[in-house]
Every structure is written in C-alpha cells, then in structure tokens.
Image (cartoon, rainbow, N blue to C red):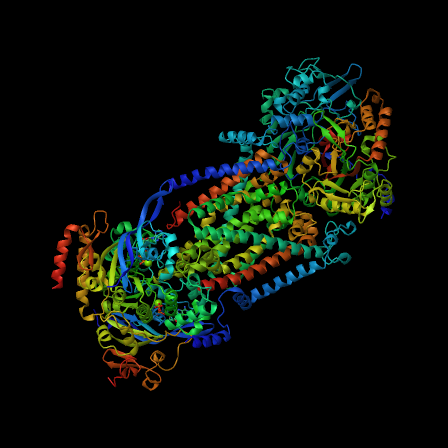
Amino acid sequence: MADKTKKKQANVKNEPKASLPPSGFRIIMHEIVKDKVALVAFGLIVLILILTFGGSLFLNKDQVTEINIIDSYMGWGQGGHLLGTDDGGRDIFKLLLMGGRNSIMIGLSVTAIIEVTGLIVGLVSGYYGGIVDAIIMRIVDFIQILPQMPIIIVLVTVIPHYNAVTLVLLISMFGWTTTARYFRSFILSQRGRDYVLASKTSGSSNLKIMFREVLPNITSMIIIDVVLMVAGNIGIETALSFLGYGLPITTPSLGTLIGFADDPVNVINRPWLWLPATIMLLIISLSINYVGRALQRAGDARQREN
Amino acid sequence: MEKQSDLLLDIQHLHTAYRLQGKFYDAADDVNITLKRDKILAIVGESGCGKSTIASSIIGLYDHKNTKVTGDILYNELNLVGLNESLFNKVRGDKIGMIFQDPLASLNPLMRVGDQVAETLYYHTNMDEAARHARVIELFNQVGMPKPEEMYLMYPHELSGGLRQRVVVAMAIACKPEVIIADEPTTALDVTIQAQILDLLEDIQKQIHSGIILITHDLGVVAETADEVAVMYAGQIVERADVKTIFEHPLHPYTRSLLNSMPQSDDDDEDLHVIHGTVPSLKNMPRTGDRFAARIPWIPESAHEANPVIHEVEPGHFVRCTCWKTFHFENEEAVSGE
Amino acid sequence: MGKEIIQIKDLKIHYPIRSGFWNRITDYVRAVDGVNFSINEGETYGLIGESGSGKSTTGKAIVGVEKVTSGQILYKGVDITKASNRKRLNYNKDVQMIFQDSMSSMNPRKRIEDIIAEPIRNFENLTTDQERDRVQELLDIVGMPSDAIYKFPHEFSGGQRQRIGVARAVATNPKLIVADEPTSALDLSVQAQVLNFMKHIQQQYNIAYLFISHDLGVVKHMSENLAIMHRGRLVELGSREEIYKHPIHIYTKRLLSAIPQVDVENRDAHKLQREKVEKEFEENQSKWYDKDGRVFPLQEVAPNHFVAIPKDEVQDAISEEEKERD
Amino acid sequence: QSSNTSKNDNSGAKEASKFPAETPKKATKQGGTINVALETDTPFTGIFENGLSTDNYDSQVMQFGNESLFDVTDSYKITSNGPATFKLDKNAKTITITIKKGVKWSDGKQVVAKDLEYPYEVVANKAAKSQRYTGSLANIVGMEEYHEGKAKTISGLKLPDGENGRTMVIHFKRMTPGMTQSGNGYFLEWADPYHYMKDVPFSKLEGSDQVRKSPIFFGPYKVSKIVRGQSVTWVPNKYYWRGKPKLDKIVISVISTKSATQAVKSHKFDIADVVNSQWNQVKSTKGVDFVANIPLSYSYLAFKVGKFDKNKHKNVMNPNAKMNNKALRQAMAYAMNIDEVNSHYNHGLSFRVKTLIPQQFGDFYDSSLKGFPQNLKKANELLDKAGYKKKGTYRVQPNGKPLTIHLAAMSGGINAEAIMQNYIQQWKKVGLNVKLTGDRLMEFNSFYDKVENDDPSIDAYVAAWSLSSEPSQNDLYGEDAPFNMARFVTPENTKLIKDMDSEKSFDRAYRTEVFHKWQKYMNDQAFVVPMNNNYGITAVNSKLTGYSTKPSKGNSVWFNVGFAK
Amino acid sequence: MWKTVLRRLLIMIPQLIILSLLVFLLAKMMPGDPFTGSINPNTDPKQIEALKRAAGLFDPWYIQYGRWVGNLFHGDLGTSYIQHVAVTSLIADRAANTFWLSLLTTILTYSIAIPLGITAGRHQDEWQDTAVQIFNYITFAIPGFVFYILGIWLFGFTLGWFPISGSVSANASGFFGVLGSRLYHMILPAILYALITTTGTVQYLRTGIVDNKVEDYVRTARSKGVPESVVFNKHILRNSLLPIAAFLGNTITGLLGGSMMIEMVFSYPGMGKLFLDSIAQRDYSTLTALILIFGILTLIGNLLSDIIMSIIDPRIRIQ
Ligand SMILES: Nc1ncnc2c1ncn2[C@@H]1O[C@H](COP(=O)(O)OP(=O)(O)OP(=O)(O)O)[C@@H](O)[C@H]1O
Ligand SMILES: Nc1ncnc2c1ncn2[C@@H]1O[C@H](COP(=O)(O)OP(=O)(O)OP(=O)(O)O)[C@@H](O)[C@H]1O
Ligand SMILES: [Mg+2]
Ligand SMILES: [Mg+2]
C-alpha cells in the first residue's frame, strides 16, 4: 500500500498545477489582463514607475533642486526645458520625475505603515474580541473623533525638522484607525466561520490561526485596500501644500508642484508649473483605481464562490 | 367551475437557456408540464436540475439579456413567453403568485410587512387604502398569523422564520391567484414549521381553488402534499405521474434511485443507496443521449434510447427513455424486463 | 452497551444580553441550560431539536471551543471544560468535529493536504513523508482520488468536501466525533453517500458520534440512542426504538409528527394526527413545561428512556407507556 | 556675474520716478461710487479706534474717515495745515495742539480739547489693554503715574480753555529732536469723540459698538455699514471741515491676496494694490493708472552676536559668537546677488537698499554709501584674510572648526523659497555653508518666536522693518532695545544713537551728520545688512482723479478723490 | 432611544476632556503667541510683555488649562487675542456662515450625486456608468483647490458671474437683499465644493444599487407585479440610500469643519478659514475652541448618523 501511494504521489507531483489557488498574484494578473482598461492602466502605472524611479536614478537631487534664477519661470520648451521651469529656474520635468518618485514613495510608505498597523490591530481586535476588542475600539473611536487636518497642521508647525519622513508619520498617525476598523470587520466575519473552529479543534494555537489561517483569507481584501489606498495617498500632501504646510521645495513632490496652483497667477499664466504634476497625479490615481477595481471584481468573484 | 378552465397552465416545449461566456445553454430543455386547478404539482430533483429555472420562466423574472426562453407557457390561452412587461405585470401577483425559499431575504427589510402585502393589492385591485388594510388583516388571519393588527406594523426582522414565510404566503395569495408557484418554500424552515406551512398551503388552495407548483427536493414533502409529480433531471422531466404512482410504481431509474437514497427504511444497518457522480453543470451537460446514463454506468448503453423521449407508459404516467425496462440497482440481480 | 466515553453533566451555556442605560448585562440567552447525557464508545448518539434549541452550542462545548458557563464535561474522568485539562490530555486528538457547511469549515486558501494534515501536525510527530502517506490513506478511506491532495476545497462538490471533512475529523484516530448537521446542506443522493461513509468509518475505527440534526429521518438512520432538545434542555432521551415508537413528551411527538412521511396512502391521516398533536402542544403547555416555560428535569420512565415531566406524573407516564407497548 | 553690480549702481530711489505718485489731475465731478480692495488673507479685525487697533488692515479700512490731526510735508514734518495746529516750545518742554474751529465729528459736534486728551487716557489705561502704550509716551509728565493707576488724570496734559476749548498743551520731561516729525511716538496724532465714547468703561471699549459697529470720525467720510471682517461702506460726512467730499459712496472690501492680480485685471475694484511679483501680469491692464510710493521699510540680513539680558533689560554682545567677525559678515553681504534677484523676481519693483536710513528721510540719508553690491571676489578675499580657510567645498572657522551658518527666514511671497535657496547657493560659492534653520522657511510666528528669544539655532536671519516716520534708531538698534534682535552693542553705536536724539540734534545739520556717521559705521560693521525695499504700487481706475501717495497729501487724499469730469 | 442618546452623550464627556487637554497642549506647543512679531514703531516690547502677563501667558500650562476649563463651564471660550472679541461670538458668526454654505453644499452634493449614482447603478457597465465613473475618478484625483481656483477664475473674475470673496455684499440691504446676497455669495463655492464631494456619494449609491438589484426582495416585488420604475425607486433605491444616510450626520458636520480650502480660496469667512487664520496668528483661545468644536462635531456627527440610521433602518437599534 505504501508503495502504491508513493507512486501516486510521484504522479501527482508531476501534474501540471492547473488548479492553482484562486488567490494570489496569478488571479490578479489574470483579472488585469482580462480587463482591457485595467491592462492599459496597469501599463501606465508601470510606465510611470519606470519613468519616475528610473529617471530619478540619473538625476542628482542637489542639482535638480539648485536655484538658477536666470532661468526662472520659463515656459514650455523654453531654454531646453521641456516643461519649463519654476520660480527658482528648476527644470519642471526633472522635478516631476523626482517629485513623482517622492510622492509615490510617500504614498507607499504611508500605506505600508497604515496597512501594517491597521492589520495587526484589526486582527488582534477582531480575533480576540471581548475586552481586548473593546479597549482597542475605544482608542480607535477616540482617534477618529480627532479633527485630523487641524491637528496635522498644528503638528506640522510644531515639529522642528519637517520632512518627508515626518510627514509620512503624521499622516499615518490617523490613517491606521480606518484600516483597523475595516480589517476588524473582515476578521469578525471570518472568525465566525467554521474553518476557524475547525482549526481550533485541530489543536492550532490562536496566533497560528490568526496569521496562518485567517490572514491568508483576507489577502485579497488587503491587496485591494492597499492598492486603493496608495492611490489616495500619493496626492495626500497636495492639500497640505495648498494650505501652506507642504514639504519644502528641496524635497520635490507632486504636492509641491501642484501646490503652485494655489496662486491664480500660476494657475492661469504658468500652467506648466502645476499642470504636468496634476496630470501625472490624475493618471496615477485613475490607473491605480482601475487596477484596484479589477482586483475588487476578482475578490468579489472569489467571495461569491465561497 | 367550468371544465376548460381547469387547465391553468400548459407548458409546451419550454426551453430556457442561460448565457455563459457568450453562449446559450439550455437549463430547461423541452419541458412539458400542465397545471390543473385544485391540484398541487410537485417538481422534484437534485440541486441544479433546473427546477427554479422553470419557475422563473413561468413568472417571467429572469435577466432578459442573458436568458433566452422559447416554447409556450399558456395561461388561459395567454402565452406568457415573450409577453410584454406591462401586460406581464398585470398577471404577476394577480393571476400568478409566487413564494420564495428564503422568507427573510425575500422581504424588503425597510418596509412594514403589512405594507408589503398591501402593495400587491395596490397594483391589482381598486381598493382604497382602508380596504387594502382590511384585506391584509384578513389575509394575515387566513395564514394564521396571531395578532394580525400588530403584525401589520412589524418589520421582517422582527418576525420569526415561520411568521415571515406566512407573510410571504399572504403576499402570494393576496389577489387569489389561480396559479401559485412555491419554490422550495420550506427548505429554510424547521420541520415543525415546515409542516405548518405545507398544511397552510393546502388549506389555502382549498379555499381559493388555485393550482400550485411546488418545487422541492424533499421527497417526503412531495409525498405529503403533491397530487402530481414531475421528476426532473439535468433540465429535463424524466418522469411524470400522480403522486401515488410515483411513490408506489416509480419507473425511471432516477426516481427509483432518489427514493432509495432516503434514510427512512427501518433496516437502518444497511447502507443507503448512493447515486454515482453528480448532476452535471450547465456547461457540461450532455446534450445527446440519456443524460442519466452516466450515473448508472452498469446499465449497458444499449438499454438507453439514442434520443430519449417521453413515453406515456400508462395513462397519466410519463417516463423518459426506455432504460427503466432493464434498470436494476447495482448490487441487485438484473431483473429482466418489467 | 459499551463503556461511556464522555459524560455531560448539567451543562449550561449562557450568553449575556446587554441593555439598559449602562449597557449592563440584564439577561442571558440560555442557549444550553442544564443538559445531562453521556455517550458510549463506538455508538452514534443523536441530538435533535428545532432551530435555536442549543444543539450546536452543546456540540461546540463538547469539542471545547465554546466557553461553558457551568457544568462539567467529563472525558476519561477529567473535566475538560478547563482549557488546561484539554491541553494536557491532547483532548482534540480524541474528540473531533464535522461541520454542517463544508465550504466554510475549510480554509479556502489551503490545499486539501494541508487541511487534512492540520490536526496531524498538531498532535502527532510525523515526518513529511509519513504525514503525506497518512493523508493519502485518509483520502483513500473516504473514497477520494489521490490527486485531491493538491486541490483546493472549492474544486470539489459539496458531497466530496464533506467527505474530506470526515477525513480530517478521523485523521488523529479520534474516539468521538461531533457531527453538527453534517448533511443538511446536501442533496439527498449526496447525503446518502456521506452517511454511508460515516457509518463505515465508525465500524472500522470504533468511533462514537454525537450526531446533531433536525432531520429525524437521518438521525433515526444513524443513531442508537438519542436526545431531543428544546429550549436549551433535553425533553426526552432514550434508545431509538423507545423514542420513535413510544414518544411521551408532547414536544417529541410534535417533532415526530412533523416529519413528512413517504406514505401517500395515509397522508390525510398523518395530517389529522399532526393537527391533533399540535393542538395538544398548544393547549397543554402547563402540563409539559413549568410556569417559566422551562422544560422539567428528566425522569426515567422505562429502562433507557427518560422524559422531562414533573415527578408526580412519572407513574402516569410509565403506565401509559406500558399500555402503548401492548 | 559681478557685471550686474556696476550696472545697477544708480540709486534705487531714482527709479521711483518711473511711476507717478499721483493720478493725473483732472477736473472732478461730484458723485459716484468706488470699490476699494483690501488685500488680506484674514478678515480685518474691525477695531476702529487708533489706540486699540493692532491690525494694519483696520487703519486701511478706517482711512476714509480717520483723518489725522496733522498734515505733514513730504518728509513727514508736521505742519499746521491740517485739522489742528502744532507748536513746539523746546524750552518750556511743551507742545501745544489746537484744533481748528469747524472741525466737526460726523455727528455735527465740534472736536474739542477733551477729544484730544481722551486718546491718551485710552492708550495709557491698563484696563483698555492697548498695545500702543510705550516708553516714549511715558516721557509725558504724569503719564506713568496714570498708567500705574496712581493718578486719575495725566497731569502733563493741560486744557487751558477747558474740556470744551480747542487747545491742549502737552508737558514733556525731556524734549527730543524727533518731536517735529510725524510718527515720533512721543505724543498721539489723533482725537477720539469723547462725548460719544465716555460712557463705555475702558475695559469694554474695544468690544463696544462705539468702536466696532458705528465709530465716528471727523474725516471726509463716515461709516454707513460694516460687515464684520469683510467690508465697510462709507458715505460723505456732511460736516467735513475741508468741504464736500466728491464721492457718494466708498466700499472697501476684503479680497484674498492671491486674488489681487485678478482684482486689478477684472476691474472689479477701482483701487487695488498690485503684488509686485505679479507685475508682468497686470502691467498692461487697460483703464487703470498705476501710482506708486516707496514705503518706509526695508528688509535686512542680521547676524546674531549676543543675547538679550531680561534682568538688566539690555542687549549683551557675545564676543565669541560665531558671527562676531566683521569680515565674515561683510563677506556674506558681498556674496548676495540682491540686484539680480530683484530684477528677476520683482521686475525692477524692488531695489537694493544701501543704508539703514531710507532715502525718504532726505538729507539724513547718506547717498555716498554703496552698501554691499555683489562682489564674490571681495567676499573671498575678506574670508581668506580673516583666516576662514577652505577645506573641500566649505570654509572652516579660523580656529579650524567647521563652519555652518544657520539662517532663519520667513516664508511668505511665492518666490521667497527660491530666493532664499538662491542666496544659500551664493554663499556656497564663497565657501560658506549656510543652512536654513529647521530645513525650511519658517512661518511668521515660529520665526519671531525664535528670533526674539535668541534661539541658539539661529546665527543669522532675514527679516524686515517697517519704520516710523521719525528716523531715530534707538528703538531698533539701541543698547536696551529688545527689537535689536542682532543683539549687537558697541560703544560707538550707543554713542551715535544717543546723539541722534540729543539736545544738540535739534540742530538739523548736526543731526544729519550724526545720521551719516551712524550709517557709515553700520555699513562697516555689517551687523545688519540692508537688503531691499519695494515699490508699493496701486492700480487706480483711470476715471478717478485726486489719488495720491505723497505723504503731504495723505491726510486729505480722500477729500480729493473723485471721478473725472 | 432617548436613553441611548443620552448615554452616548454622557460617554462623550470623558472623550471631550481628553480631547480638550490634547488640544490645549498642542496649541501651547506651537511656537509663538498672539503677540509674537508685534514689531512696529508704535509698540513697545515692555508693554507687550505686560499684556502677555495680564493675559496669563506666563502661567504654567496646567493653570492656564484649569482657567480655560473653568471658563468653559460658564460657556466662556475666552476672548480672541487677535479679534478682541469673545470667541463664542466670533465662532457663532463664522459657524453660521459655514453652516449655510455646508447646507447648500450638501443639498447640491446630493442633487448631483443621487441622479449620477442612480444612473450609474441602473446602467451598470453601460456607457452611462462609464461616464459617471470617469467623472467620479477625475473629481477624486484632482486636488480640490485646483478646481476651486479654476472655478473662481472662470466664473468669478473672467465671466464675473459670481462674487469672488466674502459672505455678503456691502451693498445688500433689507432682509431679502441680505438673504439674496448671501445666497449669491455661496452659490459658486457651494457648487465647486459639491462637485468635489459627490464622489463618495455616487460611489456608495452605485454600489448600493448594483448590490440591491439582485437581492431576493426585489425579485419578490417584481413577482407581485410591481412596475419596474416603482421597483427601482421604492425598493432598490431606498435600500441603496442606506449607506449614504449612514454618513449623513458625518457629512454635515464634516463639511462644517472641512471647508478650509474653499473658504480660503473664496475668502469666505467661515470656520475653516477662521481655523487657518487662528493658527497663523496663534490665536490660541480661538484655536482651542475650534478644535474642540470640530471634535464635538465629529462626535455629534457619529451620533447623528447612528440616529438617522436607526430611524430609517428598522433593523438597527442604536446602542
Ligand atoms: N442566471 C443564471 N445564469 C447562468 N446559469 C444559471 C442561472 N441560473 C441557474 N443557472 C444554472 O442552471 C442550472 C439549473 O439551475 P436552477 O436554479 O434552475 O436549479 P434548481 O433545480 O432550482 O436547483 P436548486 O435546488 O439548487 O435550487 C444550474 O446548473 C445553474 O447553475
Ligand atoms: N455567540 C452567541 N451569542 C449570543 N447568543 C448565541 C450565540 N450563539 C448562539 N446563541 C443563541 O443560542 C441559542 C442556541 O443556538 P444553537 O446554535 O446552539 O442552536 P441550534 O440548535 O444549533 O440551532 P440550528 O438548528 O439553527 O443550528 C440560539 O437562540 C442562539 O441565538
Ligand atoms: Mg432552485
Ligand atoms: Mg446549529
């Protein structure tokens, strides 16, 4: 009998894995490829990533942000500046590449912090429930009643060295609560499922159930959430920039560029300052959103299957 | 009662196809059934056989873009197939009532249950509001709801499963329809409640003299309530007869297998009969030959008709294919002939 | 009759209801409210009752995933309502569960191999190869093809999945399996398949089942002894023959009369009978339930037949029973 | 690059003439309504009393009715042509102010002596919480006693003809040469309607309707409607002493500074200020006249060389301060390309200021000084000589320690950041490592909080002054002046500043000499390096006439403004 | 239900105490004070210091906090250092402006969003849906202020259709004159603001409709012979509006605090603008009061949302 099973195994092993999990990267790619719009969007994202991250490799930050007042406020294509220059004679195109990269990095970092914190908190809160949940949710409640924008503005003026890192931390400080809530509700629905009970009766520990059983089941939720959140977070400093609490120009970002639009003169007479960044932000957001939707559909389809 | 109007529904050559990835597949394939006044016609079969498909085809509630219905569904000489929506709306709820499986899901959570029943009256009668209210109360009494006045004001979530289903029944019978279609009306309910609802349906039928199509997969329910039975398999009716015949002289192998797999025999140490395999999915359904053949592999292919058709073996007893003649259970000896 | 494998003593599980100004606990849902019974080695013990009567809660308490309010569950003489005892005994190696909804009871992200191996990994120290052999063997036992090992739950039909669920439950050679409505989501023909498997495995490994169901036909088919639950308590308990042939408690009678019978000839008679019982049930609440609507404690009316009736009516019941028996 | 320096050598002030200070003179007709833009990003406060108002915008809103007691010459010398006459008696240490007959409040009541005295009581009374009480005012006899609450009245204010007379005599402890200049701070230049305000306790004054909702003035227009923080409508004051104002109505309303350019271009306003950096966008606008003035202000770079000793209430210089090296300071000054920046960003509407005394002060201004035109070579030489050796890109201190200069600057106009980064690059060119404090421009409050409190994270800062029309420098750079935020104290400076306000300086020639000396000294020491001043350009509907920015016309401008025939 | 509301209100108290402390400390942490930078020829630093002392700015923070809280109980939020009026009156003024603007915005938001959401949901995956989605994505992705500035430039300055600043014109007189003028000043900002805020509503509504369309109760309604339009409006739409209603409370209060940008662009004297000004001017008393109010608004918004939900959705009991 043992021999027989061994043989069977061998066969099984060689079998093409036609029935891969209905999850993970494969289904995502599948879903994206299936949806033409999403495919285009995905292509755009890749293109922008290559441009910004690749392009930035060839740029020197000090050089890009160096002032050259002779060149200030050049229009499109003037003086060899494809997209003109800003108030300090800096090349908008280069700023755009660097700024795009920085903003994407900011968006990613904020998302990463928010997601990880939110996920862990949500997981613990939702899984254990009871008093742990009650305490955590009270804290979350409290943070959520805080008027975010005002407090961020106050903190921006308070902290001594304001830069991309502090910005990321400030924004993340509030953001995680929503994510925690979101994941908690998923966990709550998962917790009631019988497979958790089954794991318990199989003698698995809580930690193991939490991370090895429950977590993989909300991966598609996580992926979707992450994707959509990145889209929202890339432009997150624009509002602050507009209100005058953005990053310094030595840290180029889409926000600092779009922030030029806080002045009607720039809006009307110097569109090259803010328009490219706005369009880039628009493209990034739209693309990510479309991809996100495609993922959501994938996720929903799987949800239905369940 | 006039004789001719005893035939309420006459379904002829019904084909209902769903679009899957651009192609249409028949989920109901050449279905012929009739429903008579004062009769309960049960449609039984495993999950996915196409029972609900028939129901939704009759009442015209399907996604018109992705569903194709052909054939005739004659209701008093009115062909419901392809009937325009506004005309159909006059029939639905008035002449044909429908009861669904999950009473919670099939009630609007934001409306008082009384109003939901009254809504039917609003569209099919000339009653004023007071009259409608009175009629709803009457209906609630009729379906055995305690304190109907109070119940009128309740929301679905405030009622127990049994009461909800009574509301749904009240809704279906509000206009005294001639045809009631009940798609698994008791699957979501407890046995005791199930018994009550089934008894209720019978009582109602006696009062308003309608014909009922009862869709279920519970043979016990069929035996307790139906007058006529249609057994469905893979989109086709495989056997049709009055209830007694079906339970006492079932012919089609599928009917016989189903009956055998019921855990009811007293010799409980014996294994229950198991039907090999599963109902094929819509896409994989064989379109030629005997669709059930795959599940009784020990019966030689020659025993099946090449293109099985319905035979009337006795008056009122219809069986598809002739394989029943040589059919025997796997572990039995082959009984030659019948 | 074999040895008792598990004893449930005065089991109570109450869920708090919060309300009022301070959101204090104002009342309890008495999901299980004083239940006593015991299961013998290798037997199938049926637990029947209407929805919400506390069957699942009882079952979950027995496998140790539900917090018990009071009472004891004795396994090998040890009260396993305490987590530490369960751990010490490796309790879940011996007591396993089969769930109603096979889909939801399997992690959709895990392959069948990992699903079945989970209890093995937790309770036994096997090498990867041994483990795989064991999984293969289990799949063999439940009649699944061996390539199933690499598939995911959604790739199987409901009946197949339920068989996998059985495989997982028997993976550690348990002594007792709580089967909570294992077939009520299945079609008739598929149900037959699963029930057959359960029986075979029981015979093979001498497993005891607590078989929870509201389908009396199935319970009758499966179990030797059974208990009928109502409002968190047991109303009647005894051998299958006793209960089906000589039900005493009105609730049992009501339940039995509600089962659809495949007996077309006598269906009108059934209906009359059903209506009679129903009427009796409606009208004689006070006879069968105490003033709070609670079920009375069980009294023995015959060997291996207990009914929840007031003490002073035991005699009547016994004589009535005997009369019926004649 | 230094070629620019010689080219821009002509005095900035000369360029002032490229804009007129007045609109063309035309015959005026009666009637018409004008809209005046008040460009601010915050609503105006609406305290319409000169002693309590702290908001510059309030005075702009009030200007149509709030006439000063005195007219002045174009160099801010007080004359007797205005509503009141002015007489200074150096020996008797008095100033006599007499209000002219017929100068009436807009309710028709004559302005009387009590109305001249009352503002002092408001400013000096602690309950009124005025920010305007100063050491200079304490120079009036009896003022301190009144301020401390020891006296019920201010003994140095005498009303020889009684409260309802028209004359007030002010007795001073000490006379200073600046007293003849408007804005000297030793006495107040406005009147309050005592009869109208007397019933309001001082503590309630700033919130009272008399001050907030329906203030009265004796100027050409009177308030007809106030929308709090947003707009004020003025209509003619029929009792106005100079005659009948020309316009039927003046509406001044707030618009955001960001909208200034649009406000000009869209002709929604008849009078609106131009934002200099946006000059190119508005300069070709049709139908408006641009008039300009040069405000009394300048921006500067200052070096922190000491601390303010709160106990002694004195500035104390730290000889070891990083910036306490003349050569370093001068080098930094020479390294800046101010002219270049001005021509690029402000279209010639800003000009480099060469000394700390603005040109508007006439001969007090030392036109021989050149300030610090960009000269990188000189800067390098100075540093080399002073021992700041180059190690890599940057220079180190003479003692061999690395040198990083922390510069504080305020955020502000849209080009502020670029300009600052530009200077930092200039300094880098001469090997100086200059970093922004906190890595970014600071917003106003953080900036002054740090600068005023001598925060160690600041070695140098760029700020701006707005000056009083009296040129004394004591309050700005004196030894005990808290506003001397560079905290430099040298005997020479102290002496010169004392001299400016001394008895001797009543002799204008002497005072001129002192000012010249002080400017030279400051130019050499470079504790404070003057940078820029800007034109204040106003776009005026060309249908209007009579508008002027000349100091001499200031007090009667709204009487004169009207539509051309 | 009132009991529950009362309880919820009581629970708010400790939250508010923590909030107030936090806010107070934050404000104190900010560099500078209302007198910072009062550097002009007319002021004397000594007098400024005396005023600061009189204002209690040199006291330790807990004393200042204590004083502040003490006054709070008398309904006194202090006096604005900058505007020199009681903070309550200042805020009342601004709150009224913001309230009306928010109200108009809300009305406009819903009158734009609901038809769009319905169209998109009803014609799921058809061109109407795509069009709405594109509009939605664009308003979502473009920062609001770019919209506002373009709007004020086009409709305010260039075309001159709408006023470009303030909340009421100086010329307005009479009750209807003032009312009209106020409305006129609000229209453009409200429309622009509404366009930006529709995104969420449209999305929720669309999803709601798409989900509800396939619910069983809809099938039931159809089986009763209810005409399609009624099925849609009475059954599907009402259920789909639930999530929007759930946010109604938060939306209104959120707009009250969240209108900073639009108020800034339009120099509209509302709460958001007041807040930004107070930060810039270090008007602590106003600042603390405002943040506290924003916090309270959020709390009330949540409560309101819950109450609204419990009213329109019988399944929900608030607790
Ligand atoms: N809208 C649809 N689109 C595509 N396929 C459908 C659709 N509805 C039903 N089907 C398929 O048609 C077949 C018959 O379905 P139907 O719902 O009629 O079965 P049923 O007998 O009612 O089953 P059950 O007992 O599970 O209700 C099944 O294979 C099902 O998957
Ligand atoms: N976590 C819980 N909190 C509160 N009440 C609960 C909880 N779990 C179960 N209950 C209640 O306990 C009672 C018993 O539930 P249980 O699931 O044991 O019933 P059951 O007999 O298994 O019913 P079914 O046949 O529907 O499965 C029910 O009234 C149920 O509402
Ligand atoms: Mg069905
Ligand atoms: Mg259960």
Residue placed most toward the observer, D559 or B147 = B147
Q: Name the image quarter holding the C terminus of chain A.
A: bottom left
Position of residue C28 in the picture relative to residue A43 (left or right): left
- The image shows residue D166 at horizontal and vertical percentages of 70, 17
Residue C54's quadrant in the figure? bottom left
Q: Is residue D479 visible?
A: yes
> Horizontal placement of A126 versus B13: left or right?
right
**B180 shown above or below D62:** below
Task: Name the spot of residue E54 as percent of width and height, x first.
Answer: 61, 25
Which quadrant of the figure has residue D227? top right
Q: Classify the position of the N terminus of chain A by image quarter.
A: bottom left
Asked if D457 appears above or below E146 in the picture, the reply is: above
Ligand 4 found in image quarter = bottom left
Compared to residue D508, the image places residue D297 above or below, namely below
Figure disc tally: 0
Q: Image check: D512 left or right of B284?
A: right
Asked whether C281 or B120 is in front, the reply is C281
Q: Nearer the viewer, residue C172 or E214?
A: C172
Residue D118, given in percent of the width and then of the height, sits at 66, 20
> Looking at the image, can residue D216 be seen?
no
User: How far across and how far down the image is residue A140, in percent?
Assistant: 49, 46
User: Which of A93/D457 is in front?
Assistant: D457
